[in-house]
Amino acid sequence: MLDDYKDNKFYNYFKNLKNYYHAYLFEVDNLELNLPFILAFSKMLICKNHYTNKEKCESCNICHLIDKNYYEDLKIIEPDGISIKKEQILNLQKELSLKSSNNTNQVYIIEYADKLNLSAANSLLKFIEEPMEGIIGILITTDIKQILPTIISRCSVFSLKSSKNLQYNNLEIQDMSKFLSLIITKKENSLPYLKKEYLNKYLTKKDILKTFNIMENIFDCLINQKFSISNDNLYFYDIIDESLKELLLNDLLFYLEKIIEFKNKLINVSNLNINLFMDRFIIEISRVML
Ligand SMILES: [Zn+2]
């Protein structure tokens, strides 16, 4: 279950998730290593007792069947040979169109989604574009660049790639934490000032993406700290602005969700006007506490 993965950087985020997207895309370094966490998340989406009354479900019949890889409402697609073929996606859709006999959510996982051939990807896209209640898709890839941008834009994207790959220096973390603190505590809401003081080094889309990764890590660290969970990112904590540490868990989760939402937009939308995009981000995140 998800509680076995408290070290995962998205553990708290997923555990507290109230509304589900119809499609998730996980970017991973190694599929085998990350699959158990993703399966635990799937279990949470399917088993209704999973977190009821804060009691964790040890092994209801459904969880038991999922563990045995034998549960009919969890479908796993993997490449047939070198690719995932259109037929596999059409079969999947046919199976999912029959409603769950257990009245639970139905979850399908596509392993190595970068191996979808073009016609399979297009079939999947049509399916994701018209989501059906109670059907949740999880795509896993080791190479997000090989996924159709139109598919990415329909998914909520999470990178489980090791944070050891992240190269942030303390100054950047301090800067972004100050930037967030000024906006959130409303000590400063002049857009030109905020941008000039904190964002003038970040000019390209790639640079801005880096700031979003830093912000995501800041909130991730704050959330983990609330649960006293050890985590790769805890070294962040000491250099985060004090006023952010006073935020309540619900607010932290809300900000993290906003940051991920904007980050996904940044990844998915081409021809983005970066200037306008950052204005919108600053305005939206400062509006939250009104
Ligand atoms: Zn269960």
Image (tube, helix red, strand yellow):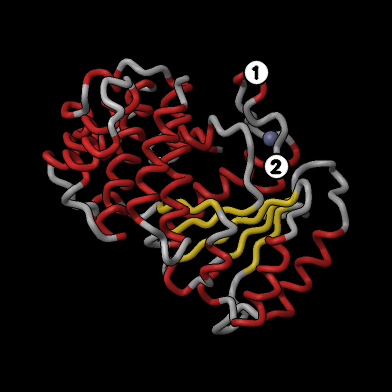
Q: Is mark 1 within 8 Å of ligand 1?
A: no
Foreground residue among 116 and 212: 212
Q: How many other residues sit within 10 Å of disc 2, few (<14), some (14-19) or many (≥20)? A: many
Q: Which mark is residue 70?
A: none
Answer whether labels 1 and 2 touch (C-beta < 8 Å): no
Q: Residue 61's spot in the image, x, y percent? A: 75, 38
Foreground residue among 60 and 106: 106
Residue at the (63%, 31%) spot, across then down: 58
Q: Is residue 228 left or right of residue 172?
A: right
Q: Residue 96's spot in the image, x, y percent? A: 80, 59
Residue type (three-letter) at the residue carrying disc 2: Ile
Q: Residue 118's spot in the image, x, y percent? A: 60, 82
Q: Which residue is mark 2?
A: 46
Q: Which residue is mark 1?
A: 53
**Vertical comparison of 11 with 51: above or below:** below
Q: Residue 213's spot in the image, x, y percent? A: 31, 47
Q: Is mark 2 within 8 Å of ligand 1?
A: yes
